[in-house]
Amino acid sequence: MKLWQKNTDVNKAVEEFTGGRDREMDGYLAEADVLGSLAHTRMLESIGLLTKEELDVVQRELKKIYAEIKAGNFTIDEGVEDVHSQVEFLLTERIGEVGKKIHSGRSRNDQVLVDLKIFLRRQIWEIVGDVEELFQTLQTLSQKHKDVLMPGYTHLQVAMPSSFGLWFGAYAESLVDDVQMLYAAYKVCNKNPLGSAAGYGSSFPLNRTMTTELLGFESLNFNVVYAQMGRGKTERILSQAISSVAATLSRLAMDNIMYLNQNFGFISYPPELTTGSSIMPHKKNPDVWEIMRGKCNMLQALPNQIAMLTTNLPLGYNRDLQLLKEVLFPAIADLKNCLQMAKFMLEHISVRDNILDDSKYEYLFSVEVVNKMVLDGVPFREAYKCIGMDIENGTYQAERSVNHSHEGSIGNLCTDGITALMDEIVSDFRFDIVEEAEQRLTQ
């Protein structure tokens, strides 16, 4: 029996087609659903729709259900449509008729909206934590290998001297901008839609400010119609942040694949972190980085998938939106897995010294020679032409020294400045407010 069902049974084929993987995906929302109900029922008591005694019974049992979910002892039973129904049925089964009162003043539309907001802000919290750990690993490697030179490329042609300090540090700073994108998504997620009901509000005197404070949201989604319009938009904005992180990881993966190749040979990994060939005994394949590159390239398509699901939908709830969970939830899990694996791999990386001693990198230093002439008073265009002619004539003599001292260059990585940027953005999230609110609700 469905919460909305009257006296007609739904055709089995229709039920299976429209249900899809929704019950499976709803398992992700179980904790959030109980948190929403804990706040909602406290609000219902404050406006006289529950007595104090009823609230005590409901709160006590909801907290037990929450503990069961945390312990992994919660499932959505066969025949139960969704997580909201399962929680309400459990509650009614355990405490009787009062369990049926918890849905007053809300619809499954705003119930799933608040579940998603609570769940997604928690996922952003966890992603940011994983990004921070990878960031710190990159910064540590940047400092450790700051004096180890390597070739820099443009058009995949040998260009100018670079360093492992610059290489690792570049990806660290890229993650700073990615976290800025996550912060924007978090600001959207951290608004309370509860009380918008089916998208047009309620005739009950709901106290939406109270539930906002109880759930630790930064503010309300004020307009009830817009609260419903936010379904799909929230996921789309988060998907863009996920895509940004994935783009950084995909490029990092490609660099690792390339630099591990024997034609480069800049880095290596322990044999147990690579795979072999069934016929070529010398092979050390970078399968981890290749799988990561593939996964992250697919994650970069996520915003387009969500855009296609939500483009031109009419106002109000539409069942298409259910499919967003099937696209977004696995993507979040993949991103977290890739972040954790990237950190694990980089913790075991070895870099090669003296790479630039090879004669094929001799022209890397041509700009250094030009700049030295300019410092000695030769106009830049004349110095450039002179060294260019020497290279063409075969008379060029490299001076294998690098003298870069400006901010962000080989000799001045600005590691502390990049770390300060990351710390500032992360502190703006104020995850502590959410944690304290959730603890107050569940204790």
Image (cartoon, rainbow, N blue to C red):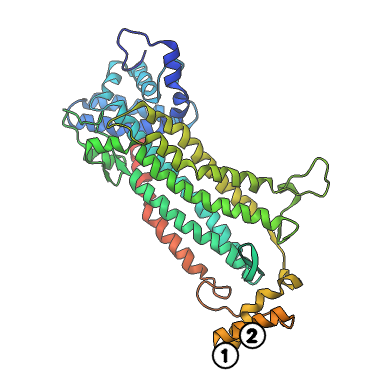
Residue shown at 67%/56% (left/top)? 258
Quadrant containing the N terminus in the rendered view: top left
Q: Do the residues labelled 2 and 1 touch (CB within 8 Å)?
A: yes
Labels 2 and 1: the sequence-earlier one: 1
Which numbered disc covers residue 386?
2
Quadrant containing the C terminus in the rendered view: top left
Q: What residue type is labelled 2?
A: Cys
- Tell me the SS state at disc 1: loop
Relative to 208, is 288 above or below? below
Relative to 259, is 186 above or below? above
Which x, y percent locates residue 66? Answer: 41, 30
Report the mark closest to the observer, 2 or 1. Answer: 2
Which x, y percent locates residue 150? Answer: 66, 68
How far apart are the two marked residues, 2 and 1, measured between alpha carbons?
Answer: 10 Å
Relative to 41, is 257 above or below? below
Which x, y percent locates residue 79? Answer: 43, 15
Residue shown at 50%/61% (left/top)? 173
Which numbered disc covers residue 68?
none
Residue 347 position by quadrant: bottom right
Q: Viewer-proximal residue, 305 or 416? A: 305
Which numbered disc covers residue 378?
1
Q: Can residue 348 be seen in this view?
A: no
Q: What number of labels is visible?
A: 2
Q: What residue type is labelled 1?
A: Val
Q: How crowded is mark 2: few (under 14 residues within 10 Å), some or many (20 or more)?
A: some
Q: Viewer-proximal residue, 363 or 32? A: 363
Which x, y percent locates residue 37? Answer: 32, 30
Decide if residue 262 is on the left or right side of residue 79.
Answer: right
